Image (cartoon, rainbow, N blue to C red):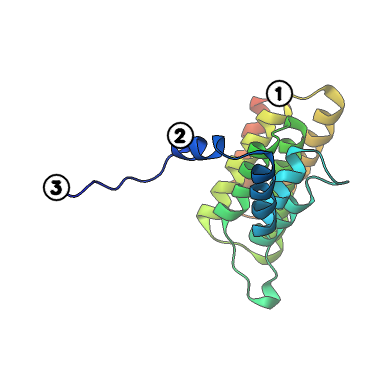
Amino acid sequence: MMPAKKTTPTWSDLKAKLADLDRAGLLGLVQDLYAASKDNQAFLHARFGLGDDLLKPYKATIDRWISPDVLKHQDTSVAKAKKATSDYKMAIGRPEGLAELMVFYCERAAGFSSEYGMDDEAYLHALVRMFAQALKVAATLPEDPRADLVARLDAVRDVSHNVGYGVGDDMDDLLAEDGVDD
């Protein structure tokens, strides 16, 4: 007789178990998840619109991983910084908030690269990709917020000409494609 094959639980498995919970049990579960991590707290605050600045925890994560404190010998992580935008998108996904996080990422990455001479090609390519994504999301917004975000991205482009690896030139091309060249 063959032993039973173990499978990884799926959303369907969890959903079936959740259906067995009453209101108090479900609230207790959410409370436990809330207490388990700051990421869960940020997600729930964003999802339910709680707090004055829903972007603050996401910006703090981006800042930590894309523009670390070099005096503390902190490292960079593009993946962890980009995860903050993905987490926000999953929690609430408002285009104006997503665009703000993307532009913030670009501002911090370009500033860090310019100030400290970042020569990590993958980091710089990720900056250009985020710049392109920020332009696309900004293009979906009404004129006033779009104009502000594009002006900030133009400032990022200016700073990025000091970085090397053709980052500023790539951003010139991206802005020209969107009809926003100088």
Q: Which mark is residue 94?
A: none
Q: Is residue 46 visible?
A: yes
Q: Is residue 2 above or below residue 154?
A: below
Task: Report the side of 171 relative to 4 (left or right).
Answer: right
Do labels 3 and 2 touch, CB within 8 Å?
no
| Quadrant location of the C terminus in the rendered image | top right
How far across and how far down the image is residue 151, in percent? 81, 36
Which residue is rendered at x = 49% and y = 35% of the image?
A: 16
- Residue closer to the observer: 61 or 73: 61
Mark 1 residue element: loop
Q: Which residue is mark 2?
A: 12
Which residue is rendered at x = 75% and y = 53% of the image?
A: 57
Task: Report the side of 94 relative to 10 (left or right).
Answer: right
Q: Which residue is mark 1?
A: 179
Q: Which residue is mark 3?
A: 2
Closer to viewer: mark 3 or mark 1 = 3
Comes first in the chain, label 3 or label 2: 3
Comes first in the chain, label 2 or label 1: 2
Q: Using a 10 Å C-alpha cutoff, classify the residue at mark 1 as few (fewer than 14 neighbours), some (14 to 19) or many (20 or more).
A: few
Which residue is rendered at x = 72% and y = 49% of the image?
A: 42
Instruction: Using the numbered discs, state the Cα–Cα distance from disc 3 to disc 1 in whole angstroms.
Output: 65 Å
How far across and how far down the image is residue 17, in percent? 50, 40
Q: Is residue 82 above or below residue 47?
A: below
Q: Using a 10 Å C-alpha cutoff, classify the residue at mark 2 as few (fewer than 14 neighbours), some (14 to 19) or many (20 or more).
A: few
